[in-house]
Image: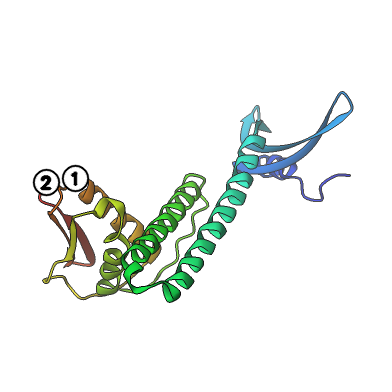
Amino acid sequence: MFCQECGAAKAILSSLAGHKSLEECHLTRFVNCVPEALDMLVYATPFAYNSEQYSIFSIADISHEKRRRALERIFFHDIINTAGGLQGLVSLLKMTAPQEMAPEMQLMEGGLVALMEEINAQKELASAETGELAVTYELIKTSDLLNRVVELYENHPAAAKRHIIIDPSMAFIEFRSDSTLLRRVMGNLVKNALEASKPGETITIGCQKAEKVVRFWVSNPG
């Protein structure tokens, strides 16, 4: 069996037409009669010599990268499902737990929210490193974004005996961006500020309009 559209053949034909090309090719080789599937990244570059058109062709084995990405997708899928199930369980417990356990339940819920944020942050980082990260633009209100950041991190372990407030002079602006990625960046800044602060100190977050952009900032006493 042969592929109807082989990436290697397409790359070579494209280079013979005068264009650099990068494609993927899937091959099966036999080692001692045992089949082994290979994922290859193929490069083809046009090369002219004595009025003849040639193709410089090279192959890189990316089978290990493909397997790693597949395992990462399975890992993140399973761990997000597990953490999400725990969040649902804690929500049910909050509704039936005695009133005196409210602080502990709040702390547990905050910890699980922080855990989900960390898992999703690692998932997005892995996607960014492989060029698979998708950016989704949507309308965002600065007040909603900053309030969400405070909600997420005021119960974070790093926030113990520390305070997070929003600057009263913050600019109320609507703009378009990826709210998940922006919240992730702000969250990292807040965590850095919390870790650099002493018990009893206050971290302030805010934003301001600067020409055609919105500038967000995080400040701590240190």
Q: The residue tagged with tag 2: helix, strand or loop?
A: loop
Tag 1–tag 2 contact (CB < 8 Å): yes
Residue 6 position, x and y percent, is 76, 45
In this view, the residue in front, 168 or 134, is 168
Q: Could you tell me which quadrant the N terminus lies in?
A: top right
Q: Is residue 74 visible?
A: yes
Q: Crowdedness of circle 2 by 10 Å Cα count: few (<14), some, many (20+)?
A: few
Mark identifier at residue 222? 2
What residue did someone put label 1 on?
Answer: 196
Q: Quadrant of residue 47?
A: top right
Residue 104 position, x and y percent, is 34, 62
Task: Give the residue type that dot 2 points to.
Answer: Gly
Using the image, determine if residue 20 lies above or below residue 139. Answer: above
Q: Is residue 175 left or right of residue 39?
A: left
The residue located at (34%, 74%) in the rendering is 99
Task: Give the residue type that dot 1 points to.
Answer: Ala
